[in-house]
Amino acid sequence: MRKIYFALLFVSGIILTSCNNKEVDLQFEKDVMYEVYPALIDSVWVNAVLTYIPPPSPGVDPSEYKLNRRNESKKRFNEELADFKKRKFPVDLVILDKAISRQKGKELQEHFKDAVLSENNILDTLDYKFDRKKLDSYQAFHLHYVSKIYRRNEVKIYNNCCYSIRGVLVLSRIQFDDEKKYGVLTAGIECGDMCSYGYRIYIKKVKDKWVIDKIEDGWIA
């Protein structure tokens, strides 16, 4: 009986330690997310304006078309931004109120060559709710939180609640390397059925601060 008691005590200790480690890891991830959020949201909003270019018509040179469209988009963006600053009008964004889970990939190691990811380095499959006070403290954007990604006729929410809405912004959880020096996450703009585009965002720790290393196009539908 005594052996069984100590065995149960040992197993309980392991389970408790595992749970505590997960809580510590999740809090670390949240702290990093809130730290990079201002730079992340600035960059994603700019990229959403500059990089979303529909395909050219048949017979049009793709390179020249893309360059012209980027120049046009950049001009419009600068005009909008100047107007926002002049009126001190925050940019409205609709955002999913949680960080969603994402599949583990090799992008982190491919981008950061010295990143170490062991076999037991896995992504948690759970979503977590954002602390709205943390996000709202960056007042350059006026966030409208939603609990789901809207589809079809529900897309009217973009026009009803906000100015210049391009879709629901969705942020993923962060995948870190073993040493927690690097990380990768995704940001997507969901604008309806068969309408979405997103970015892969690489972050790294520099002098005890987390910064964005690169944002690259991830997908378009």
Image: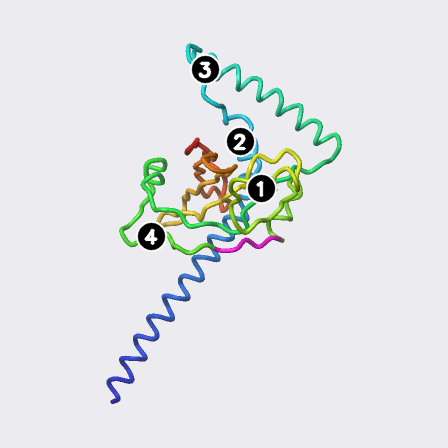
Question: Mark 3 and mark 1: span between their CA atoms?
Answer: 37 Å
Instruction: Give the residue drawn at x 53%, y 20%.
Output: 70
Question: Mark 1 and mark 2: span between their CA atoms?
Answer: 15 Å
Q: Check the image and report above or below for 53 versus 99.
A: above
Question: Mark 4 and mark 1: span between their CA atoms?
Answer: 27 Å
Q: Amino acid at mark 1?
A: Pro
Residue 131: x %, y % from top left: 57, 55
Question: Along the polypeptide, which appears first: circle 1 or circle 2?
Answer: 1
Rendering quarter of residue 46: top right
Residue 32: x %, y % from top left: 50, 49
Q: Amino acid at mark 2?
A: Ala
Under circle 3, the secondary element is: loop
Q: Range of the magenta residues?
A: 128-132
Instruction: Examine the structure image and report whether residue 129 is included in the region drawn in magenta.
Output: yes
Which residue occupies the extreme front position in the image? 153
Label at residue 151: none
**Which is more foreground, mark 1 or mark 2?**
2
Mark 4–mark 1 contact, CB under 8 Å? no
Horizontally, residue 52 falls left or right of residue 162, namely left
Question: Mark 2 and mark 3: span between their CA atoms?
Answer: 21 Å
